[in-house]
Amino acid sequence: MTGDFDFSDVRNYPPEEYAGIVVLKLHRTANASFILNLLEGFLQQEALVAQMPGKLAIVEPGRVRIRLAQEKGLK
């Protein structure tokens, strides 16, 4: 789990090689309370968290985008 969008580059960090990558979309002014609320909101979605292995999630207020692992051989 990170706020660093470099980890959302699936060419450098293929999600299928990890237990799941979660990138929090944070504003520069995000404080600890904002980050905690965003994280808690994501973690409370148990079904979503359970399907994270091998996937990339971009978490932002009111929305979670999931990117599936790319099939081998496809670009």
Image (spheres, helix red, strand yellow):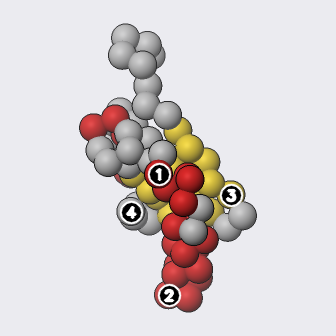
| Image quadrant in which the C terminus is located | top left
Q: Do tag 2 and tag 1 residues touch (Cβ < 8 Å)?
A: no
The three-letter code of the residue at mark 3 reads Arg
- Depth check, mark 2 against mark 1: the one in front is 1
Mark 1 touching mark 4, by CB under 8 A? no
Residue nearer the viewer, 11 or 37: 37
Task: Say what amino acid the circle numbered 2 marks.
Answer: Ala
Look at the numbered disc 4 and give the secondary structure of its residue: loop
Q: What's the residue at 45%, 48% (across, down)? A: 52
Residue 74, located in which quarter of the rendered image? top left
Percent across and percent down for residue 32 are 50, 87
Where residue 45 appears, as percent x and y from the top left, is 59, 62
Q: Amino acid at mark 1?
A: Ala
* Quarter of image, res 16: top left
Quarter containing the N terminus:
bottom left
* For residue 33, above or below residue 54: below
Q: Which residue is mark 3?
A: 63
Q: Residue furthest right?
A: 62
Q: Earlier in the sequence, mark 4 or mark 2?
A: 4
Which residue in the structure is indicated by mark 2?
32
